[in-house]
Image (cartoon, grey):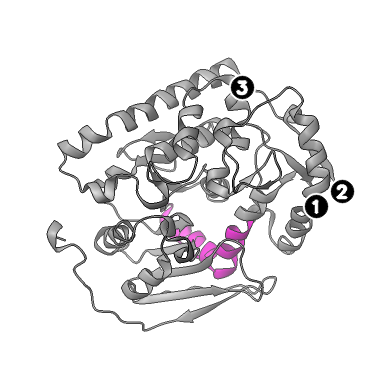
Amino acid sequence: MPQVVLLQNNRRLSHAEVARARVICDEALGWVGHREAYINQHSLDRRFALPDANWSYDAPNDFVQLFRRISQSDSQTLAHFRGLTQVFTGYNLYEVCKGFGLRASTMELSANLDEVISARLEKQNHLFVGRWRKMTVGIPRRFLFKPPLLLGEVGHDINGVIVNSDTCTYQERINLIYASGLADWLDEKIKMGGDVRIVEIGGGYGALCHWFKQAYPAASYTIIDLPESLLFARLYISLTRPDLVTVAGLAEAPHGVRFVPNYMAEQLNERFDLVINTLSMSEMSEYQIKRYVDLMKRVWLTDRGVFFEQNQDNRACGLQCAEQVFKLEFPEHINVVSPRRPRNGSPNIWALSPIRLKARRLGGIMTRLISKIRVRRRNFYPESGF
């Protein structure tokens, strides 16, 4: 097995970085605290703007309590940040197992944690080391997800990449973007116009954005999320990529990263080349999914943009299958298929006009174009005037 990477190997945050984190946490607390007033002031749709379904305050997950813990911004918690992000990935890095039934918000950060993590990694992380080796055969270095050695990242070091379950999760998404032809499509857009505009709905702890800004420095990247969740991405990006221009709210950040609370989404009257969602739409209410679809169709994708998503079918646990909604609403569809079933849901690309992508055959991944799926545009929300 390759060398184990532990907490003691991570670079410690400086006093200035901890101070920066505290400013970000105070900002996020303000977003949450002023949400109701903002919704009332702008006469926003509460069914869309407030947390719901798997992300509601009474849902059986840990994210509200975790937000409260992270927002205290003490240096010990920040140093173990990555061990507290299981609510987004479903995997607990320090227990080295699936996060089901575990509560990261109450995890003890003991003095001998490294010793415990090391033993667990040696016993349980070999599965992901083997999986990562297979899934990265033939992948250019630019398209490898490389977690920074900061904020409590742990795993095994393979040629400078810290490999764990989360690394494999995000590498799968990057592989799909690469093999589907989206990567080349983005390169061509940058070549022609000098920029691409990307918006990610539900940014998790910021990992996909981190990779995008390494692979596509010219990209202008926006993350829309619940303010409780947005805190994680804002901390991760700001602390691991201090070189990037980052802004909060609706002000633009050309070639940088912008963080937009979800209740401001309807005021984002801009066009994007690429909209991304992974996992979270199937955890929203059906009403919220359709509201985001309406924004894409009316505003965000009207200039030949595309929508890449990878969502699970969560109907068995009382939630949604977002793909079934998208099938009825987007006239153009590329289904990214693989002989080996993706771990993290069904990957698809949707658009309002014909899509021209040159797919790559890589590790058995290929794309199948389903075209001329024409649907009648419907009025989702007559009570809202849409």
Dot 1 alpha-carbon crowd within 10 angstroms: few under 14, some 14 to 19, many 20 or more? some
Disc ID at residue 216: none
N-term mark: 1 or 3: 3
Local secondary structure at mark 3: helix
Residue flagged by tag 2: what amino acid is it? Answer: Met
Above or below for 342 versus 196: below
Q: Earlier in the sequence, mark 3 or mark 2?
A: 2
Q: Which residue is mark 3?
A: 76
> Which of 138/318 is in front?
318
Q: Name the residue rendered at 37%, 27% in the picture.
A: 29
Q: Is 178 covered by the magenta stretch?
A: yes
Residue 136 magenta-highlighted? no
Q: Position of residue 218 (x, y in %)?
A: 48, 47
Which residue in the structure is indicated by mark 1? 126
| Residue at the bottom extreme of this rendering | 372
Residue 284 appears in view: yes
In the rendered structure, the answer to whether residue 97 lies left or right of residue 349 reads right
| Circle 2 residue | 1
